[in-house]
Image (spheres, helix red, strand yellow):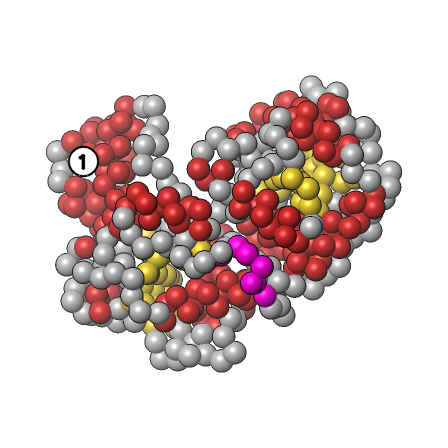
């Protein structure tokens, strides 16, 4: 999914190769610099299934850090020293009356403690309060108010480097059209505003465009871009067939990711085009199956299970072109620079995408794909139909060359150098 101020962050000044295909062995520096230093990585996610957070952990371990983690569930990367699981929320807080009570009568900092930090294991709270960590990395914004709680982030704890990686853009006005959504909107906006808390010594985000949105809105230094680039995978492009072009979309199932436009295009495309959706399971997959069952090209459209995070590039290598067709209906889709783009490059696929500026810049620079002029199904169909087998071979070869530069090693170097730079702002 998805994260910003170096100059020209996605320009041609990027770089060397990586030997390993495992995100947790993405060792950016030539030798560890932080032996005997401890880091805590916090994420409101299942960390083992979160590519961006897993890469952070790998970079830190490769730099000599001893890493603990706090996240959802008991699973974590084996390389961490200690994983702390966020406890389940109290059942009463998830009822309608509990939601009404906590969001209408409880002061916001006490509310945050009830909703989030009361769920942190006591052992980890003791370590934080004692100043056991030299670095604390917050991921996304769910935990941000915690940094201002003096009961946990004591003077000793605040002596650490405290970094915030915002990943993508979270809109200030997004709320569900439900009673619960309206009740919690004020809490969401308050938590989100803590992105600008001066206790964070540095910040990063998925790309410069999204970083600029945060900088302008919150009056903070531009977050440094750390792109969602996977490790280098040592493989070559698969053979092409002039009589068959194997199209692929892999990743999250969501209508706003161009599924309807892809299906519309397949109505017009000749039989040499096949389409595979490699999707994470959710309710949309079932609805998509229904649309495919009624589609005139249904025999050429398939849904297959997702690949494990570390195996994606190898699993998709047998396809020809990745379709990344995101109509710009919100800022994250307009400025998207997702995992799937770089996974497709490591998979040695050509890229077909709409006029998404961050992605289009990379495809034009490396010549490994085509940019569709428009976001309609007919636009996509016309662009694809014009492609020859020679075009497909050329784009796959260009992704092969780009894979030598667009891998996790340099992103790790940028991340680690950011953590060693003078602080951006501090209370």
Q: Which residue is mark 1?
A: 102
Most prominent secondary structure in the magenta stretch?
loop
For label 1, the SS is helix
* Residue 201 percent across, percent down from the top left: 28, 62
Which percent across, then down, holds residue 116? 26, 48
Question: Which quadrant is the C terminus positioned in?
Answer: bottom left
Q: Give, as a single range, the part of the protein colored magenta.
A: 9-15
Residue 157 vs 90, above or below: the answer is below
Instruction: Give the camera-side residue of 306 and 159.
Output: 159
Residue positioned 48% across, 73% down in the render? 62
Whether 343 is among the magenta residues is: no
Towards the viewer: 404 or 86: 404
Q: Residue at x 69, y 45 (%)?
A: 369
Question: Counting other residues with Cα less than 10 Å from the Cα at mark 1, is it few (<14), some (14-19), or many (20 or more)?
Answer: some
Give me the residue at 42% from left, 68% from top.
Answer: 416
Residue 199, by quadrant, is bottom left
Is residue 279 visible to the viewer in this orientation of the structure? no
- Residue displayed at 23% across by 53% down: 197
Quadrant location of residue 69? bottom left
């Amino acid at each position: 999914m998805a994260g910003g101020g170096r100059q020209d962050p996605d320009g041609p000044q990027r770089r060397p190769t990586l030997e390993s295909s495992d995100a947790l062995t993405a060792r950016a520096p030539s030798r560890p610099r932080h032996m005997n230093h401890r880091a805590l990585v916090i994420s409101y996610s299942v960390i083992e299934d979160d590519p961006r957070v897993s890469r952070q952990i790998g970079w830190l371990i490769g730099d000599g850090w001893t890493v603990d983690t706090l996240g959802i569930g008991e699973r974590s990367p084996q390389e961490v020293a200690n994983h702390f699981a966020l406890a389940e929320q109290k059942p009463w807080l998830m009822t309608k009356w509990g939601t009404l009570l906590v969001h209408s009568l409880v002061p916001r900092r006490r509310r945050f403690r009830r909703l989030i930090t009361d769920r942190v294991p006591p052992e980890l709270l003791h370590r934080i309060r004692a100043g056991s960590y030299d670095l604390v990395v917050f991921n996304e914004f769910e935990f941000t108010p915690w940094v201002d709680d003096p009961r946990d982030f004591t003077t000793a704890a605040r002596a650490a480097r405290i970094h915030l990686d915002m990943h993508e853009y979270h809109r200030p006005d997004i709320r569900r059209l439900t009673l619960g959504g309206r009740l919690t909107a004020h809490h969401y906006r308050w938590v989100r505003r803590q992105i600008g808390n001066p206790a964070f010594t540095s910040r990063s985000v998925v790309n410069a465009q999204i970083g600029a949105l945060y900088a302008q809105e919150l009056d903070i230094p531009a977050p440094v871009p750390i792109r969602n680039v996977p490790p280098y995978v040592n493989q070559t492009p698969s053979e092409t067939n002039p009589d068959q072009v194997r199209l692929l979309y892999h990743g999250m199932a969501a209508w706003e990711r161009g599924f309807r436009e892809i299906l519309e295009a397949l109505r017009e495309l000749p039989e040499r085009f096949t389409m595979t959706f490699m999707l994470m399971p959710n309710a949309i997959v079932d609805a998509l199956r229904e649309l495919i069952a009624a589609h005139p090209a249904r025999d050429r459209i398939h849904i297959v299970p997702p690949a494990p995070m570390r195996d994606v590039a190898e699993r998709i290598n047998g396809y020809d072109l990745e379709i990344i067709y995101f109509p710009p209906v919100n800022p994250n889709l307009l400025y998207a620079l997702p995992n799937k783009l770089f996974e497709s490059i490591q998979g040695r696929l050509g890229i077909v995408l709409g006029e998404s500026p961050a992605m289009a810049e990379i495809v034009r620079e490396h010549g490994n794909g085509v940019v569709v002029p428009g976001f309609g199904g007919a636009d996509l169909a016309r662009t694809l139909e014009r492609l020859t087998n020679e075009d497909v071979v050329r784009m796959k070869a260009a992704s092969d060359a780009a894979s030598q530069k667009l891998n996790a090693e340099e992103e790790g170097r940028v991340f680690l150098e950011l953590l060693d730079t003078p602080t951006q702002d501090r209370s």
